Image (cartoon, rainbow, N blue to C red):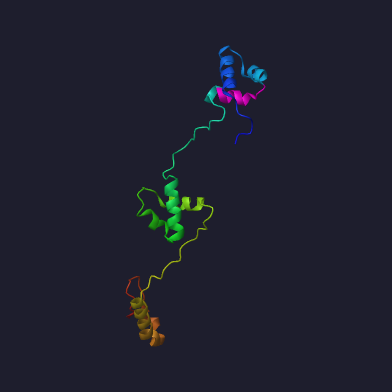
Amino acid sequence: MPKASQLSKEEMSKILHLKLLDKTVKKISKLLNRSKSMIYHVLTRKTPYEPKPRSGRTRVTDICSDRRIQRMASSQKMSVREITGPSRLQISKSTVHRRIIESRYMIHAKMARRLLLSELHISKRLQWARNYMSYGDKWMAVLFNDEKNGTPVDL
């Protein structure tokens, strides 16, 4: 809502007519008992309360896409990467994260990471540890390298 009362069509036409008669903005504002800024708005934008044109880059997503992103993040517990994959728009992960933060009703948090080890990996590690647990002082003679297979090599 505007703070001041809106101008009527008659007042707007008076302002434009007085400007054509080479009256200054200060004189027009005194004659019509209106603020100078309102007169400037009428002369520059033709209507007193037309919003200023937005500067900067236009948004990639519209309101519907924003809601869809927020819905996927909240109800389906999807990660940002999972949301960017199937979306029709080419949007970055940071854009998705920003849209989630913009919704004031959601609390964003990192997803719990799943364990990278399967049951087979866990059993193999335990078996390796049991095999070499009783090595004792022989470990001083073992040479470890950066290879991935973790079998000790005797010198």
Q: Position of residue 52 (x, y in %)?
A: 52, 32
Left or right relative to 57: residue 128: left
Residue in the foreground of this view, choosing between 115 and 145: 115
Residues in magenta, as a range:
33-42
Residue depicted at 42% across the width and 48% down the height: 65
Residue 94 in view in this figure: no
Prevalent SS, magenta region: helix
Residue depicted at 46% across the width and 63% down the height: 111
Residue in the foreground of this view, choosing between 51 and 81: 51
- Magenta segment: does it hold 91? no
Count how many numbered circles sit on residues in the image: 0
User: Does 2 sit above or below residue 46?
Assistant: below
Q: Position of residue 32 (x, y in %)?
A: 65, 20
Left or right relative to 17: residue 115: left
Q: Position of residue 40 (x, y in %)?
A: 58, 24
Q: Quadrant of the N terminus?
A: top right
